[in-house]
Image: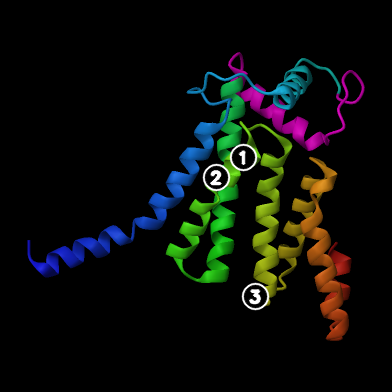
Amino acid sequence: MKKTDKLSLFRKLQTYIPFILLSINYLTIILSFRSSPFSHLLNDHDSSMFLYFGKAMNAGLTPYINMFDHKGIVLFWIQQLGTLIGGENYSLGIWIVECIFYLLTLHYLYRTCMLITKNKYTSSLAILLTTGPSLITFSGGNLSEEYALTFISIALYYFTNIILLNNNKSYYLIIIGIMGGLTFFIRPNMIALWVVFCLYFLLNYLINKKYKLLSRIVKLS
């Protein structure tokens, strides 16, 4: 093989590196979920309780009346959807939902990294390095943190877009607000991202006297 051919092949292979790194992260995470059809581990206490809520809601019971937990209603709707999709094999349905949620999380985290680094190799490597901490955080999957992370990742992307690219589009703010609401109604103590960024925008716009922009954001919120 000629040197030029080897170089051309190497460059072609390079284009697949980000996809490979992201795929390693994605497959490692989704196969670590206890709801995976390849897993023989039982769900932990919290996950089992959430599954019970989902099945009970599909059976006609009402959360907070017929059964109670301090988590938000959005989490139970997610469980209801998963158990509905899975039918008798409710764990499979939950796993499918988890796979979709983590795919969205991965997509928006990668896009956020691209906004910051503008380098697909650095961005994909950064995502790969989160694999270990993610395995610890998810702890077998189907926990409130896992689902909230999806909405947090989406909001983080749009917050970063506004700050770095000065994109103050109205629909960005609407999406950020919706994601904040969904996160709040999964677990209220996970809205720190919105608190921090909203304080930043408030102080920044007041200092720079951007009162019209601040007024528009307040109206949209």
**Which secondary structure, mark 3?**
helix
Q: Residue 35 vs residue 66: left or right? A: left
**Which secondary structure, mark 2?**
helix
Report the residue at 81% width, 72% height from top: 201
Residue ID for mark 1: 136
Camera-side residue of 218 and 125: 125
Q: Is residue 88 magenta?
A: yes
Residue 211 appears in the rendering: no
Q: Could you tell me if the residues under marks 2 and 1 are in contact, i.e. CB atoms within 8 Å? A: yes
Ranked by sequence position, the earlier of labels 1 and 3 is: 1
Camera-side residue of 100 and 22: 22
Residue ID for mark 3: 164
Q: Quadrant of residue 67?
A: top right
Type of amino acid under label 3: Leu
Q: Residues within 10 Å of mark 1 (few under 14, many from 20)?
A: few
Image: magenta residue range: 63-90
Given this view, does label 1 or label 3 mark the residue nearer the observer? 1
Where is residue 87 shown, x and y percent of the image? Answer: 61, 17
User: Which quadrant, please, contains the C terminus?
Assistant: bottom right
Q: Is residue 41 above or below residue 123?
A: above
Q: Is residue 105 above or below residue 121?
A: above
Type of amino acid under label 1: Ile
Q: How is the image coloured?
A: rainbow
- Residue at far bottom of view: 208
Alpha carbons under labels 2 and 1: distance apart: 7 Å
Residue 115 appears in the rendering: yes
